[in-house]
């Protein structure tokens, strides 16, 4: 498991199609999906937009 927090981490996860678990305040928001794209402020998984500053992104199978 690896915590993603830099743009390069998200790019690596996109390229390798890692499954990402999204947490916010210790609650799971998304139980696992592949990142579709990222911007400076958001990550899109399964059509849902998550704010990087508000969430924690964990790669579950890197």
Image: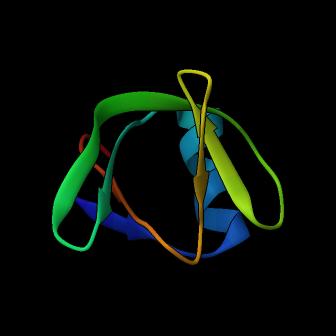
Q: Is residue 50 left or right of residue 21?
A: right
Give the quadrant of the N terminus.
Answer: bottom left
Left or right: 2 with respect to 26?
right
Q: In which quarter of the view is residue 58 placed?
A: bottom left
| Quadrant in the picture for residue 44 | top right
Compared across the picture, whether 32 is left or right of 48 comes to left
The residue sitting at 62% across, 23% down in the picture is 47
In the image, farthest residue toward the right: 40
Give the colouring mode of the picture: rainbow
Task: Please tell me which residue is depicted at 64% across the width and 49% down the height of the picture.
Answer: 43
Q: How many marks?
A: 0
Quarter assignment of residue 25:
bottom left
Residue 28 screen position, x and y as percent? 21, 50
What residue lies at 40% left-to-right and 28% top-to-bottom?
Answer: 33
Taking the view exactly as shown, the residue that stands out farthest to the top is 46
Q: Residue 40's spot in the image, x, y percent?
A: 83, 66
34 versus 62 height, above or below: above
Query: Measured from the top left, where is residue 22 in percent x and y?
Result: 35, 51
Residue at (70% x, 66% y) in the render: 8
């Amino acid at each position: 498991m690896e915590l993603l927090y830099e743009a390069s981490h998200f790019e690596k996860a996109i390229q390798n199609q890692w499954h990402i678990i999204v947490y916010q305040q210790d609650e799971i928001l998304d139980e696992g999906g592949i990142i579709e794209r990222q911007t400076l402020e958001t990550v899109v998984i399964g059509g849902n937009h998550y704010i990087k500053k508000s969430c924690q992104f964990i790669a579950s199978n890197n």
